[in-house]
Amino acid sequence: MAISDASPPAGLSNSIDAHIEFSFKGKTYALTSTLDLDRLLAQHDSFPALHAILAKEHGIDTYSYLYEVMQETEIEFQNAQGIAAGFLIDGKFDPEAFAANWRDNKIAALLQPIATSELGITDLNQIRDSRMH
């Protein structure tokens, strides 16, 4: 997956809806959460376990049999916003590739003012893109 040209426009954050449905002891559980991907990556060094996040948001103990059953079910994703949309294909989200891209964009944003003031480079993405072609 190519690096996004920029961070999402102001006001547009990276988020995605995560849904999981499973049964345990005759009861069906359908859990849905909107995940703020920017907040998750800002708080963790790597992408956190999404099953654990969904469990905590819905009051499921991560040391329970209910959670073990939940972990056996694949999470479905939809409604990705920001650069996350480029990492959602047919309901499958690539969190590792998104996280790498997110970090690259954060680093570029930190380096851009230095590149502009010290080297006169106004857009690091143009240099990166020209080297990729």
Image (spheres, rainbow, N blue to C red):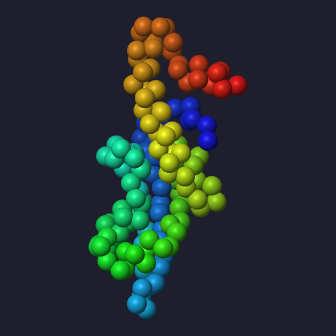
| Residue name at image x 70 percent, y 25 percent | 133
| Residue name at image x 44 percent, y 71 percent | 71
Instruction: Please give left or right for residue 128 compared with residue 39 in the image.
Output: right
Where residue 10 sits, quadrant-wise, is top left
Number of marks in picture = 0
Residue 59 at x, y percent in the picture: 29, 72
The reply to whether residue 85 is visible in this rendering is no
Where residue 112 sits, quadrant-wise, is top left
Task: State which quarter of the image contains the N terminus.
Answer: top right
Task: Tell me if residue 99 comes above or below residue 58 in the rendering.
Answer: above
Residue 93 at x, y percent in the picture: 55, 55
Please identify the residue farthest to the right as the structure is shown. 133
Residue 83 at x, y percent in the picture: 53, 43
Please identify the residue farthest to the bottom as the structure is shown. 26
The reply to whether residue 128 is visible in this rendering is yes
Instruction: Please give left or right for residue 66 compared with residue 91 in the image.
Output: left
Residue 90 at x, y percent in the picture: 64, 60
| Residue name at image x 42 percent, y 7 percent | 118
| Residue name at image x 43 percent, y 92 percent | 26
